[in-house]
Image (tube, helix red, strand yellow):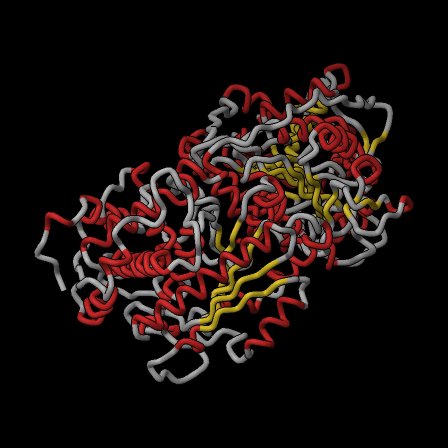
Amino acid sequence: MSSDNNSTIPAFCQGIQHFGEKWPEFDKHTAEAVIAEGQSAISNSADDSSVYQTLLAADALRYLTLQVTGSKGSGHPGGFASSAEAHASLMMLGHTNIVTEVGHHAPGFYSSMFLDSSLEEMGIYNMDDMMQRFREKHGLLGHLSGAIPGLLAPAGPLGQGQHFAMAGAYLHRDKLFPVTIGDGGMGEPYVLNSMMHFHTAYPDITNFLPVLIWNGYSQEHHSMVSLHNNKQMTDYWKGHSFDEVILVDAKDFDDSGQQGAFVDSTRFSLKQRLAFAKAVLQGIDAAAKSAMAGKLTAFIIKQLKGAGVHTVGAKSHNLYPADTLDQQHIIDGLQRRALPAEAWQLVRDNLRRAGGGPAVKTVVTESELALTPLPALAMNEFSSEEKAVPSTAMGALVAQVGLSDARYVVTNADGNEASAMKNINDALKIRHPSHDPLYNQEPDGQVYEPLNEDACAGFAAALALFGSRSLWLSYESFAINGWPIMQTVAQAMAELRRKTPSTVCMFTAGALEQGRNGWTHQRPEIENYFAAMMRNGNAYPLFPCDANSIQVAYEYAASSYNKSMIIIASKSPLPVYMSLEESRRAIENGAATIYETPAAELKTVSKGTVVFAVTGDMIFLPVFEAKDKLEKEGYRVRIVAVINPRRLYRPYDIAWDTVAEPDNRFMDDDHFNALFDGDALLAVSGGPSAALEPVLIRTRAARRDTFCWKRGETTASPAEIMEFNGITANEMLSRIEGFFSSKKAA
C-alpha cells in the first residue's frame, strides 16, 4: 500500500511507487542502523537486529530491481531476486568488492549502487532518475559494465566473472572478492575448472569467494544442475579442490508448504524468513572468514528463481514490453515487497557505510593501482643481412618486463616453447607445483599455463582491467576460444573513468607456419574479428614485419593504456626489413615503405607502378619474389608494410572520441598517397583481408585487388599452403599483367 506520511520519505525515494506497513517488531530492531557511523560492517552476524536489517536490505534490493525493470518493461529481475539475501549479507558484512558472472543480475547490482549512493556520481539521485536512465544511452546499460560507479567489472557472456575475482584476489591479498555465479551457467565446465587450476597454481591465494545462486533455472528452462541433490552439489565443488563448501537451502526453513526442491523464501512467515536470512548471513560470514584464512571456500544459496518478484522460475528471468508498472502482476509483486517508508533511510545508512563508504569511493577499481615503472627495454637490433625469429625477439623483452614487475603474469595454454619463446620460460619460469628445472617449472613462476584459452585470456584480461600488466600468448588458431572476454574487457576499458594498462596479446604460429598440422591449426579468420574491432576506437591489431618491428610493437603495446593491443607474428627465422628507428616511425605512422625499385634500375619507359600493401611477416616472401618478376617485366614496385592499420583509417571511420585515453592520430591524405599511390595496388595478407580495409577504401589506385587467406589444408611447407590459397609470385604477376593488358585494350 502507499504511505500517506510523506514527511518520512527520504528524497532519494522520489519515484518509489509503493510503501508497505511496518513488519512485526519493526521498532524494536530498527531503532538505529546496525552499521554505525564510522563502522564498515555489522559486528555480529548472530545479532537479531543485524539479521532483521539484512532482510530489509534484501527486500529493498528486490523491490528496486522489479520497479526499475518494470519502468522499461525490459531487463532481468528473476535471477538476482534469488540472490538477494546473499548479496545483502555480503554488503552488511563489509565485503563490497563484489563481481558477478551473471550479466542478467545487472538491475540488482545497480540497485545496490543506488542504495549506497554510488550512482550519484553519474547524476542518479532518486528512483525517478534511476528509472529514466535504466537501459538508456549514457545510463545503466542492460548488462554490467565497469564504467558504472562502484562496480568492478563487466559481465556479459557466462563463465567470465570468476576471472575478475581471482585477479582482484591476486592483486589485493587483504580483501575478499566475492563472485556471484548462476547455476544456469554451471553447464559451462570451465567456471569451476578455471578456479581449480588457479588454486593449483596459487594455493596461497584464497581470498575470492564464489557464491553460487542455485535457483533451479536458466534463462528459458531448468538449469542443467537442477536435479542435483545437496550432497551432489557439495561434492561437485569439493571435487574441484574446494576445502569448504557452505550450503544454505531455503527448503529447510519452509513453513508454507511449497512443493519441489526449490522454494521461495519470501512466502515463509516472517519468523522463518528471518531464520533463513540468519542462516545466510552467518553462512556468508563463516565462508568469508574461511576464505580469508587460507581455505578455498564456496558458498551456495539455494532458493527458487524469482523469489520475491512478479513470478518465479524461468518465467521470472526477464520482462517483456507488456510487463510494465501499470500491469496488475507487476503491481502485486511490488506491493508484496514494499517496505515501510521508515525502512529506506535505515537501509541506505547501512549500505552507504558498508565496506568503509560508498563503493564508488572504496572498491579497488575506483582508483589507479600503483605500477612498477616500465624499464627501458634493451632491444637487439638485427641487421638486414640476417634472419631472425620475431617471436623470440619479443620474448626477450617480455622477460625484462617480468623481471622488473613482480606482479606481471604471462598466460599461455599451448606452451611458450612451441612458439619459439622459451626465453620467457627461462627468465620468468612456469608456475607449477612440481619444481623441475628441465621444464622451467617453479611454484613461484610468472608464466601461468592452464590448458584452456578462456582461462588464459580471462586472467590476463582481468589483471589489466584491475590495473596490472599482463600478456596473453596463444596460437592464432586457438585464440578464438578465449577472445570473447578480451573483447568484453576492451569495451570496458573504452568506458572506464581511470587509466589502466592495455590488454596485450601476441598470437604466433600463424596459418602459414602450420602446414603439417593441417586446418585445425590454420584459423587466421580471427584477424577479421580484430580488424572489425579497430572501429571501436581502442583496438589495435599490430602486424610487425620482422624481428625488429615486433620489439617496437611490444614496447608500444606495453606502454599504452585502456586499449586492446594484438600482435600477430611468426615463430620462424625471417628476413629483416627495418631498423628499430624505422620500426618506431612505422608503428606511429601506421605503415612504411620497406622497398622501392631504385631509380637507377628503372627502364626508360616503365610499364607502371605496382604497390604492395602487406600485413604480416612470412607473407613478404612471395611478395619479394613477385617484385623480382615484376621488375624484370619493366614495372616499378613499392612494398609497404602495414604495421598498425588503425592509424590508416580516417578520423571519422573510428569511434576514437568516445573512448577513455583517446587517440586521434591518423595518417593524413598526403602521407597516405605518398605510400600507396600507384597504377595498381595489391593488398596482401597471410590471413584475411579485413585488416587492409583502410588501405582499400582510401587508395586512389584505379586497379586494386587482394591476395589473402581462403581456407586451410595439410601441406608440407608454408610455400605449399600459400600456393593452395593462390598467394604466389606467379599469381601476383599474372594479376598485374591482367590489369595492364585490360587497360591497354581499353
Residue extending farthest to the top is 600
Residue 447 visible to an observer of this rendering: yes
Figure quadrant of the N terminus: bottom left
Tally of numbered discs: 0
Question: Which one is in front, 296 or 702?
Answer: 296
Residue 745 visible to an observer of this rendering: no
Residue 432 in picture, x, y percent from top left: 79, 49
Question: Which one is in front, 368 or 336?
Answer: 336
Q: Residue at x 84, y 51 (%)?
A: 434
Q: Residue at x 12, y 58 (%)?
A: 3
Left or right: residue 649 compared with residue 357: right
Q: Residue at x 56, y 69 (%)?
A: 187
Question: Which one is in front, 599 or 227?
Answer: 227
Residue extending farthest to the left is 4
Figure quadrant of the C terminus: top right
Residue 479 in picture, x, y percent from top left: 66, 50
Residue 564 in picture, x, y percent from top left: 56, 38
Residue extending farthest to the right is 438
Residue 173 in picture, x, y percent from top left: 60, 42
Q: Which residue is drawn at 30% across and 67% down?
A: 309
